[in-house]
Image (cartoon, helix red, strand yellow):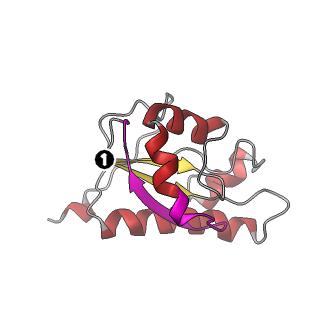
Amino acid sequence: MSNKSKISVQCVVGDIAQQPDVDAVVNAANAQLRTGGGVAGALHRAAGPGLAEEGQSMAPITPGQAVLTGGHDLPNRWVIHCLGPVYGIDKPADQLLADCYRNALALADEHGIERLAFPALSTGAFGYPAEEAAEVCGYP
């Protein structure tokens, strides 16, 4: 039986910058891959300045896109940065949000990353309603 058939999902409330049991954390990034508020701010503060420095050459990213950097001072080897859609502005929002998750998972698969921590992408400052975002992700 392959690892791909042993997928499990857990919902955890906590600090995404303090998840040592995962290989990668997913950043609710801004287009410039710089520090910000919310998830991006927490990850950048915990990772140190190297995270923003590494991301400079990859920026800007577009809604739905995902890119990979090292984890720097985080307890994780990797950070997958996703730019979610701004609700009511970036369209089609549901497709762009789904692309974030698909592209992050594709990067994880490509790099042999088995354990990931995702935030609720786009539901903070980008205004995506949490219930609608959960439906996009296939959560009932």
Q: Is residue 105 magenta?
A: no
Is 89 located above or below residue 71 in the figure? below
Residue placed under numbered mark 1 in the picture: 77
- Tell me where residue 94 sits by quadrant: bottom right
Task: Residue at 75%, 51% (x, y): give it.
Answer: 128
Which residue in the rendered view is the most extreme toward the right? Answer: 88
120 relative position to 94: left or right: left
Give the class, few, some or many, for how many residues have Cα within 10 Å of label 1's Cα (few <14, many ≥20). some
Q: Residue at x 49, y 50 (%)?
A: 53
Count every numbered label the image shows and give the total. 1
Q: Nearer the viewer, residue 13 or 135?
A: 13
Which residues are the magenta region? 56-74
- Residue at 46 percent across and 46 percent down: it is 51
Q: Residue 106 falls in which quadrant of the image?
A: bottom left
Where residue 76 sits in the image (x, y, percent)?
33, 42
Instruction: Give, as a three-letter code, the residue at label 1.
Output: Arg
- Left or right, 1 with reference to 126: left
**The N terminus is located in which quarter?**
bottom left
**Depth check, front residue: 28 or 96:** 28
